[in-house]
Amino acid sequence: MFGRVWASAEASGLRVLTARSAILSDEDAIWASECLALRDGGLKGGNKILVLQLMGEDSDSKLATLVGHLIEQGMPRGAVLTAPPGAPTKDITEGFFGPPASRRLSTKCFSSAPSNSTTCFLVLPHAVLSGHAGAILSDFSYSLDSAAAAGAPPLEVTSCRLLDLSRGQTEEFLEVYKGVVPEYSVSCVTSSFSPLLLLTLTHPLYHTLCVGLGHGK
Amino acid sequence: MVNEYSSGPLVALEVCGEDAVAQVRAVCGPRDVDVARRVREQTLRAKYGVPAGLGNPGGRAQLGVHCTDLLEDGPLECEYLFSLVER
């Protein structure tokens, strides 16, 4: 699911900035439904959601293309929704993707999980710049699904983020590998984007919700 | 390694579930791309890694993907990338 959405976003000319997976509490479901102007049949407590923050030029038309792709791939048409004009962009962005202190949505097992139940996976810059991120994430999801089908404990992507690390941040992140991994050595590129939000809701009944916040900051 | 990780945008995932570190390591494959291609050809490093000397900058191998090596580092790496790094 996750890899497929990512690959579809790339194919539509959009880039995924952040993604989070969570099960909505009753309060969060009400909040999210209000943000999206959903009335009857809106989000419910217990719904499992995958939220993606997307970016790109001409994002409105590309979002429409993406939604079309997702529907073509079997997602129920009625489960793909976009935010109405005038939606509280700042509140939505902060609530779903802001720093932990201000974020409304909490992921399921971030930081409080046993150490062997949380791991970090990165698609490295050369692969992203080569346009392989979607294929890698699709392969990654397929491999995890296949392992689970073969009896391995199921794994789930709970958060995802596209980011540029500075040299200093990279050195901090890789500190634990210094002196251990032979290829460790002691550079940086930045990029900027205009934000747009896509929310997909899955479960129960494979619902998907997409929220487009338009372009601009 | 630092050069490679800071050379452009990367995609970071937090993955949760029982035995996540070992499972994700298995999907990524060996850190040596040549070895991965010989003995674990279905792994991500075998498919998307670039061996040393194949036109990549500096002639160093590019692994395609990174995964947490040690059990205790998973939450720390995720906290750093999803919480501590400025948005």
Image (spheres, rainbow, N blue to C red):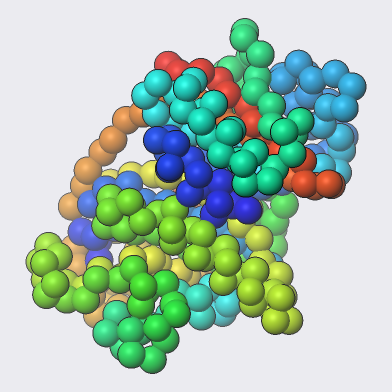
Q: Which residue lies furthest to the top in this view?
A: A86
Give me the residue at 56% from left, 39% from top.
A69
Residue A142 visible at all: yes
Residue A51 in percent (x, y) is at 63, 39
- Left or right placement of residue A212 versus residue A155 in this view: left
Say above or below: A193 vs A168: above
Camera-side residue: A75 or A39? Answer: A75
Say above or below: B50 vs B26: above
Residue B36 in percent (x, y) is at 35, 84
Residue B77 visible at all: no
Camera-side residue: A11 or B23? Answer: A11
Would you identify the image quadrant in which residue B14 lies?
bottom right
Say above or below: A127 vs A199: below
- Left or right placement of residue A63 versus residue A77 in this view: left
Camera-side residue: B5 or B79? Answer: B5
- Left or right placement of residue A211 versus residue A48 in this view: left
Would you identify the image quadrant in which residue A81 lies?
top right
Give me the residue at 39% from left, 59% from top.
A123
Q: Which residue lies furthest to the bottom in this view?
A: B39
Residue A117 in percent (x, y) is at 66, 69
Give me the residue at 24% from left, 71% from top.
B50
Camera-side residue: A127 or A187? Answer: A127
Give me the residue at 44% from left, 53% from top.
A134
